[in-house]
Image (tube, rainbow, N blue to C red):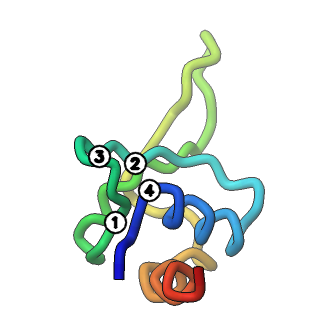
Amino acid sequence: MSYTLDKMMTAIKTLKANVECAYHSDNGWGASTEEDFNKIEWKTGEDSSGSAITTTTNPHSEITWTKVKAEMDKL
């Protein structure tokens, strides 16, 4: 099963449509393990200059590695 970056982002948006996050990959692949999933940068706000404030601690309880992987498997 290939977990492309597009598949991963589609799965995340399926679970929560308005979520903002970023995943940096040198090879274009999305997260294929929970360890990779834990490297996603989740937007939690903006600073006074409009730059994103991010964290790798997932603030969305409805978005878990298990749920994202299940959605990717459906695609």
Of callouts 4 and 1, the N-terminal one: 4
User: Which of these two is toward me, 10 or 1?
Assistant: 1
Q: Marks 4 and 1: which is nearer the front?
A: 4
The residue carrying mark 4 is 5
The residue carrying mark 2 is 23
Res 50 → quadrant: top right
Of callouts 2 and 1, the N-terminal one: 2
* SS category of the residue bearing label 3: loop
Q: How crowded is mark 2: few (under 14 residues within 10 Å), some or many (20 or more)?
A: some
Of callouts 3 and 1, the N-terminal one: 3
Judge left or right: residue 48 versus residue 25: right
Rendered residue at 59%/71% (across/down):
11
The residue carrying mark 3 is 25
Judge left or right: residue 51 versus residue 28: right
Rendered residue at 27%/65% (across/down):
36
* SS category of the residue bearing label 4: helix
Which quarter shows the N terminus? bottom left
Where residue 17 appears, x then y in whole percent? 76, 61
